[in-house]
Amino acid sequence: MVPPACPSCLRSAEPFFALIPSPLANRAIEQHGCRVGMKHALKGGMKARKLEDLLVYQKALEGIDAVAPILRELLRCRDFELHKQLSESSGRILGHIGEGFGQGTDRQFAKYLCIARGSSQETRGHIAAAARKYPSIPAEVAIHASGVYQDLIDMLTAFIEHLRRCDFRWR
């Protein structure tokens, strides 16, 4: 289902993927019924002040929790190589988001988010390999973990596109 367009900005009222909704954004929702959107975030001065405010960062943390059972099973099966690859690819995502957040421009931030998106794709590949190689990994665990990372990829893609459109010099 496509969310309704915002009457004030006549754009799709897609959720803004980067920030936690604030009271200002909630007021915009109440005033004209749209959901939190980039247009409203900029109007209200909504801004991520710390890394933990980014929804993509929170989703990456959720991904770490989702791959934990798979990593435990890989250790139990003594597949240290696949364990290392999955652990490193999932862990790098947080580092790339954090490093990008510390950059001065949106273009630089987007560059690091692209790298994080690539690591997310890599993680999905390792999850698929582990699930295929070891039937002892429950299918629902692998599907859930892969889904979390696909959601993260979609969020990163939307955030990258937004940053490229805005291209603020200094944040």
Image: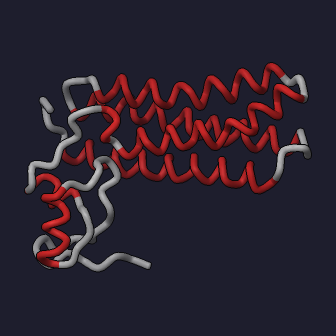
Q: Quadrant of the N terminus?
A: bottom left
The percent position of residue 153, horizontal first and vertical second, equals 50, 47
Query: Which image quadrant for residue 130?
Result: top right
Image height of 78 relative to 8, above or below: above
Q: Residue at x 61, y 28 (%)?
A: 89
- Left or right of 85 in this view: 54: left
Q: Residue at x 20, y 78 (%)?
A: 33
Q: Quadrant of the C terminus?
A: top left
The percent position of residue 92, horizontal first and vertical second, equals 53, 25
The percent position of residue 170, horizontal first and vertical second, equals 12, 29
Q: Residue at x 87, y 28 (%)?
A: 76
Image height of 84 relative to 72, above or below: above
- Left or right of 154 in this view: 131: right
Image height of 111 relative to 142, above or below: above
Q: Residue at x 65, y 49 (%)?
A: 146
Query: Which image quadrant for residue 129?
Result: top right
Image height of 9 relative to 159, above or below: below
